Image (cartoon, grey):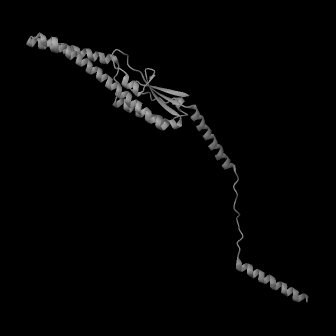
Amino acid sequence: MKSVRLQFKRKFDDQYSLTLQNNLSIQDFQWMLGLFNQAAHLRPPPGPSSFWIGSLVSFWISIVLLFYLLWLQFHHIYLVAALLPTFIILVMLHLMWLHRYKCIKFEENILEICSRLNATENIRGIHFRFIKNNVEVTPFRINSSLSTFNKAAARYTVVIEFDDRFIALKNQQRRTSFSSATLIDSDETISMPKTTYKFDEKRNDDNLHDMFHSDDNEKGYIC
């Protein structure tokens, strides 16, 4: 079974390879990749963890500075002691939820496209799989995975697999069709005659009448 791996780097790799040449046309390949890249553009993945960690630290610093200014203004120590940790935790939970939400939406959309393409392309021996960090993505894994900032950025890949049995059958059908067409072209056709005999009843009666009269004359002459 042959396969082609399309890595995701802001968009899925749309380079047409030689492996696809005998299995998938350029037009079909571009159309399918357009579906994946459009979904990735509308619902992009969360991006590298460094971006989210940097955003979290920036929010924490901003909150600390804000509460420091409030303490200088009102001189209420309980304001800082009670509300500052609460805001820090809420900001962290919100960013974790946003990171997981973007990740789930991206994976669900790409997996849905793979499922729809498989429903129509499996008949041609073409199968699509969605891979995340060398593990196939399934609805169960999407809902059960935890989103954290301490992991490296996920590596997404779309794998297009081609079943050799369907490809061999398709090539056999092409050879059979070509042989049949060649055999038909080589057969000699029966030509219609240029002239045909047309039966004329009146003319035939006249000929019979002349023939009988001629016979009577000959008999009379002999006698």
Quadrant of the rendered structure where residue 47 is? top left
Q: Position of residue 124 (x, y in %)?
A: 53, 37
Visible residue check, residue 141: yes
Residue 11 located left or right of residue 190: left
Count of residue discs: 0
Q: 169 above or below 82? A: below
The correct choice, above or below, for 206 with respect to 113 in the image is below
Q: Is residue 186 left or right of residue 132?
A: right
Q: Among all residues in the image, which is located at the extreme right?
A: 223
Left or right of residue 95: residue 174: right
| Residue at the farthest left position | 74
In this rendering, is residue 195 above or below 216?
Answer: above
Name the residue rendered at 40%, 30% in the picture: 110
Between 141 and 222, the one nearer to me in the picture: 141
Name the quarter where the C terminus is drawn: bottom right
- The answer to which quarter of the image holds residue 59 is top left
Residue in the image at 81% along x and 85% along y:
213
Residue 27 visible (yes or no): no
In the picture, the quarter occupied by the N terminus is top right
Quarter of the image where one finds residue 36: top left
Residue 184, horizontal then vertical, whole percent: 66, 49
Tell me if residue 160 comes above or below residue 191 in the rendering. above
- Counting from the top left corner in percent of width and height, residue 132 is at 42, 23
